[in-house]
Structure formats: structure tokens, C-alpha cells
Image (cartoon, rainbow, N blue to C red):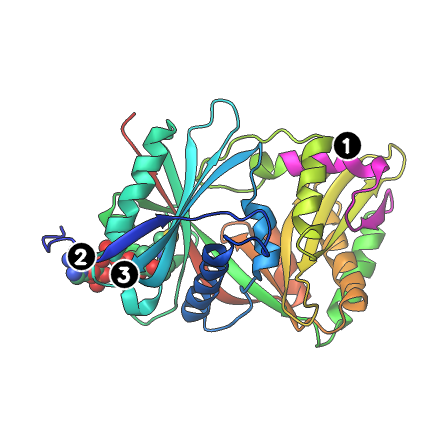
Amino acid sequence: MITAPAPTGIELRPLTIPASLDAPDAADFLAMVDVRNRIYREISGHGDEAITAAELLPHYLPDEYELRFSWLVLHDGILVGRVGVDVPLHPGSRVAFWLVELLEAAQGQGIGSTAYELVEQTAREHGRTILQSWAEHRATDGPELAAPTGFGSIPHDRAARFYLRHGHTLEQIERNSAFELQGSFDEVDRLLATAEEASSDYRIVQWSPPTPAEYIDGYAWMKSRMNTDAPAAAMEFDEELWDAARVSRHDALYTDGGRLLLVTAAQHIESGELCAFNELVVGRDRTEASHQEDTLVLKEHRGHRLGTLVKCAGLLTWRALVPQSPRVLTYNAEENRPMLDINEAIGFVPIAYNGAWKKVLDA
Ligand SMILES: CC(C)(COP(=O)(O)OP(=O)(O)OC[C@H]1O[C@@H](n2cnc3c(N)ncnc32)[C@H](O)[C@@H]1OP(=O)(O)O)[C@@H](O)C(=O)NCCC(=O)NCCS
């Protein structure tokens, strides 16, 4: 247990969300994005997680699906980190998602624990009893903590000590992998050809936002299945209801910040139903790393190589759309063998592991 007195000189300042980056009150938001990017670079050792303020702002503007609470952490007047608590507004939701992120120089002094008090307080104020959070745990040679899923482990590092000290348990390991877009696509071509043979009842359709009218319902249904059909171990997610308005809001999160999103879907030819999809995204600067976001094959359409189909078709179009992006990063549950098999066959290589942590508060 911590016995040292709480550190002094800490200010937890509620983050002002400006209407635009030109607004007179935008300075704190710009500073938050800057400290976020510096922290992620320190943790990962690379800049592929960086995002610009223009790209991030749409995610912080008021939203009917989620409340976002954010604070800047200042130590003796200097910005050293940030705190965030996201409260989904799904009826009956019990969950809240949180982060406390500090620059290395500010760690190990009790600042994180002081900031964490805001997390539980905010969750309780909104009637949330399930706290969940993710962190990258940098590879070391020291002792490891194994996930209860039986798949993967993370170092027993400072972040792990922090979660454990504050009553969280490790629930799942997420693998972060990268695929080099400038390298050979021979395997992608080969895998796509085999997948096409196994899925002759389906065809590929692709679009970038705004989602074409004919795909809105099918895309909305597939997005709603992400929280129910992807392996979540003991992490808890609300079943999300997606309709045309939510798809439109989702599209705007990308287009308003100047990011490019490509959705690649498999459509059942006879029924017209969308059955599988994959999303690739890159920032306004198309020479930066790309990110793979959601990928899903609806349960009733599994076994036709649709996962391989949408991933490979997506990557091939992506290479033509953003020829200067160096690589694609993706995140998968370490127990999600079918998805990892596809990624490994394509040529994705593990670069980091994240822990998924959870705490259930007394009601
Ligand atoms: C994880 C993280 C938030 C912890 O913040 P922190 O300020 O280092 O953690 P604490 O407030 O619990 O500080 C405790 C540490 O400071 C030491 N300490 C020194 N003075 C202290 C004091 N007055 N009070 C409490 N702890 C003190 C403790 O011994 C302990 O050391 P340890 O980390 O080696 O076990 C921080 O390391 C971080 O930002 N990491 C990167 C992002 C991340 O992984 N976030 C995870 C949550 S989303």
C-alpha cells in the first residue's frame, strides 16, 4: 500500500473543448493532444499513434452516444499528462472507460494515483460500476502477468502495478501488429485468390464516407455486432444500437478531421446482405502510418474465408489509395486465433502487447 503523503503542486484542470481549433479557448485542447502524442511516443518508441488536434477534435465534440470527461494534469504549473473518463449513454449501461497518462518524467511520484481518484468519482457520479481501461506494456525481461484467458502475458511493469494497486484485474491481452505496406504483396495476392475461390457466393464492395445509401443498413448492423461478436474475455461492452444517424456521425468523425477511411465489405450476391467488413484509416497526412479499425465476419457467414477476403481486398485497394503510407497497425485479442491466423498469413508482425483491465466497484 502507498504510505507516502500525496504529492503537492498538482492541478487537475477540466479540459475545455473548443468549438474549433481557431477558437480563443483552443489552447488547452492543443496542449492535451501534444502531451498525448508525446506520451504515446515514449511508451511505444515510435510515432505511429500520433494524431493531430484537427483529427481528434471531432471525437471530443458533444455526442448523443457518449459523455467524455477529460482533465489536464499539471504539476507545479507544467503540463505532465491527462485523465479521461468515457461514459457510454446506452440505456442501462454500467460501464465506464478511463485513462490516466503521464509523461515518464512525472511518473513514480504518486501523481497518477491522485489523478485516478477523479476516475472513480466520475464513474460513481454517473452510476457506473464497471471500470475498464487498456494500456500498452512495454516488453522487458522481468516477471510477467498472464491473462486469465490463457493467451498472452504482459510485463509486471509500473502500469500493471498501478492497475493492481487500484483494484483492477488483468482480463485480456491484445496484440498490436504491423504490416509493411512498402514490402511485397505476393502473399496478399495469393491469399485473396484462395479466398475468392472459397467465397463465390459473395462479392467485394468498397466505399469511403459518406456511406452510400444502399449500404447504410447493412453497415449499421455489422457495426452493432462488433460489441457482441468479437472476443471480449471478461471485458464488458454494451450492445450498441446503430442506425443511419449513428453511421452518419461515425462517418463525420473521419471526414471532419480530414482522415481517409476505406470500408471493404463482402456482400452476399443473392440476398444483397453485407456479411463481413474491414476498415482502414489514415490521417490527413497520407504519408503517416495507417490503422486497421474494425474487422468482423457476421457469425452466420463464418467459414467462407470472408475475413481473408475483406482484409486482402482492403489492403490491395489501400496500397493504391495511399501509396506513401509506410505500414498498417492493427489490434487483436490474443485468443482470437482465427483473426491472428489471417493476419500472420498476410505478413502482420507483433510489435507490442496491451493489457485490458477491469474493476467492479461496489454498487
Ligand atoms: C500508470 C501511470 C498512470 C501511473 O502513474 P504514477 O504517478 O507513476 O503512479 P502512482 O501515482 O501510483 O505512483 C506510484 C509510484 O510512485 C511512487 N511514489 C513516490 N512518491 C509517492 C507518493 N507521494 N504517493 C504515492 N506514490 C508515490 C510509488 O512507490 C510508486 O512506485 P512504482 O510505480 O514504482 O510502483 C503512469 O505510469 C503512466 O502514465 N504510464 C503510462 C500510461 C499508462 O500506462 N496508463 C495506464 C492507465 S490508463
Q: Please provide the residue range marked out in magenta.
A: 200-224
Left or right of residue 105: residue 109: left
Q: Amino acid at mark 1?
A: Asp
Q: Is residue 204 magenta?
A: yes
Answer whether residue 298 is visible to the viewer in this image.
Answer: no
Q: What residue does disc 2 label?
A: 8
- Residue drawn 79% across and 43% down? 211
Q: Amino acid at mark 3?
A: His
- Residue furthest to the top: 92
Q: To which quarter of the image does residue 9 belong?
A: bottom left
Check disc 3 and report the residue beneath it: 75
Membership of 305 in magenta stretch: no
Give the farthest residue toward the bottom: 183
Cα distance between the residues tagged 2 and 1: 53 Å
Vertical position of residue 18 compared to residue 104: above or below = above
What residue is at 82 percent from the left and 47 percent from the top? 199
Question: Where is mark 1, residue-wise?
Answer: 217
In the rendered image, residue 13, in percent from the top left (x then y), is placed at 35, 49
